């Protein structure tokens, strides 16, 4: 089962797929992407292919070691995301060759279904509550939303009250049986996070995510010590070494991204590290169907799994959505806030290759917005 061909596809709305084919015609799929930097990741996939073509596809760990450490310059999101997508595809191939889901190769399933949440948005507290109630009506028992748009380093009392008031209204609307998580998205300074978090405590959010930028991860202990709210982080941490110092800061939830943090191989290791610190696993995944499928394989094999992000209906996906590139979308049927354990071989999905190739004829060039404050200075997006 030697690798014969590696192809990448730019797929709207902002995804990159990789197809790995073996000399006996077996095909595995992965999703290597840095949102807004897809071209760079595709170039690294092409560079890595030089060492992979002709190699035995079943030697996943050896390939992972060579891809991540075989060059003198290591690390960073572009390289680790390229590795992640290829790693997903290799696991897909291995599962298909053996006729079993990937989670069986990771020790077997530890649950029958996985809890998922959906994104909500809104320009007002009322709109946020309406979106949450709509999600509840559609069977979800957990949602996530951003806390605020662009913020100054230390905001006014009025802005602080607006943030807290919208979530007070959200809790009143959905009641205590529905969970909501809050994403600070790295837009809060450490000082602002410490000011706002205690005010949110009476609302019992499921967790608050990325309270500070990843470059301030060493300061997370100050954040976790200042609040009883479970703190989540990790979508911009790309390896177990990035997590090494973070797991001991008192965070409650680790959020590695299967398309950024070295794929199934590395996230499985991060999950095991997190378990040793009593930290739950909730993989980051506002991406496409292959990334979600890879995430679920790890979820079903990880005892400390909490909940899975998924992108169906997220605002990024206008015109193209999560299910558009699957032969059988039912594999991602969400019922009572959960998705059933997939039983198909490999990643458990059947990618519609014809749809992918057609979509790639009109490739995206997605870029995130650039935000500025009232004084014209840069603001975190």
Image (tube, helix red, strand yellow):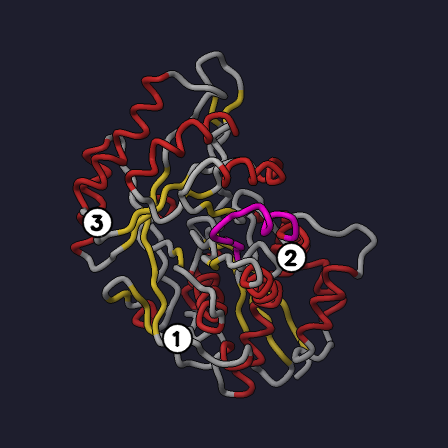
- Tell which circle, 3 or 1, labels the residue nearer the N-terminal end: 1
The front one of 337 and 226 is 226
Q: CA distance from mark 2 to mark 1?
A: 24 Å
Q: What residue appears at the point 35 percent right and 23 percent down from the top-left corner?
A: 160
Q: CA distance from mark 2 to mark 3?
A: 35 Å
The residue singled out by tag 3 in the image is: 176
The residue singled out by tag 1 in the image is: 111
The front one of 227 and 38 is 227
Residue 240 is tagged as 2
Q: CA distance from mark 3 to mark 1?
A: 25 Å
> In this picture, which residue range is highlighted in magenta?
244-257
* Left or right: 222, with 13 as reference point: right
Q: Secondary structure at mark 2?
A: helix
Rendering quarter of residue 260: bottom right
Residue found at the very far right of the displayed protein: 72
Q: Is residue 101 something one can see in this rendering?
A: yes
Establish if 316 lies above or below 377.
below
Establish if 318 lies above or below 267.
above
Q: Position of residue 330 (x, y in %)?
A: 30, 71
The front one of 163 and 332 is 163
- Tell which circle, 2 or 3, labels the residue nearer the N-terminal end: 3
Neighbours of disc 3 within 10 Å: few (<14), some (14-19), many (20+): few
């Amino acid at each position: 089962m030697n690798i014969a061909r590696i192809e990448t596809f730019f797929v709207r709305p902002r995804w990159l797929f990789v197809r790995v084919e073996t000399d006996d015609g077996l095909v595995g799929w992965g999703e290597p992407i840095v949102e807004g930097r897809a071209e760079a990741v595709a170039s690294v996939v092409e560079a890595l292919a030089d060492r992979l073509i002709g190699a035995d596809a079943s030697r996943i760990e050896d390939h992972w070691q060579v891809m991540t450490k075989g060059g003198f310059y290591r690390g960073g999101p572009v390289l680790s995301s390229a590795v992640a997508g290829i790693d997903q595809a290799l696991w897909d191939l291995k599962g298909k060759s053996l006729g079993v889901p990937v989670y069986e190769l990771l020790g077997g399933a530890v649950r029958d279904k996985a809890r998922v949440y959906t994104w909500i948005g809104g320009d007002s507290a009322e709109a946020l509550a309406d979106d949450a109630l709509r999600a509840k009506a559609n069977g979800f028992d957990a949602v996530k939303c951003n806390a605020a748009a662009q913020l100054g380093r230390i905001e006014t009392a009025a802005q602080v009250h607006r943030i807290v008031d919208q979530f007070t209204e959200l809790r009143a609307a959905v009641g205590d049986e529905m969970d909501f998580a809050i994403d600070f998205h790295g837009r809060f300074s450490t000082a602002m996070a410490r000011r706002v978090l205690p005010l949110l405590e009476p609302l019992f959010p499921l967790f608050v995510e990325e309270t500070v930028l990843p470059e301030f991860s060493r300061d997370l202990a100050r954040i976790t010590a200042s609040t009883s709210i479970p703190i989540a982080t990790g979508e911009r941490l790309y390896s177990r070494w990035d997590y090494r110092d973070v797991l001991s800061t008192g965070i409650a939830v680790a959020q590695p991204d299967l398309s950024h943090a070295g794929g199934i191989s590395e996230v499985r290791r991060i999950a095991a590290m997190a378990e040793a610190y009593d930290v739950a696993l909730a993989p980051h995944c506002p991406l496409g169907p292959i990334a979600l499928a890879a995430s679920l394989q790890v979820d079903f094999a990880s005892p400390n799994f909490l909940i899975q992000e998924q992108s169906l209906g997220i605002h990024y996906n206008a015109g193209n959505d999560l299910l558009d590139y699957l032969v059988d979308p039912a594999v991602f049927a969400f019922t009572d806030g959960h998705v059933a354990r997939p039983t198909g071989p490999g990643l458990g999905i059947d990618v519609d290759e014809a749809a992918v190739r057609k979509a790639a004829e009109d490739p995206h060039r997605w870029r995130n917005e650039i935000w500025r404050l009232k004084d014209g200075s840069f603001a975190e997006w």
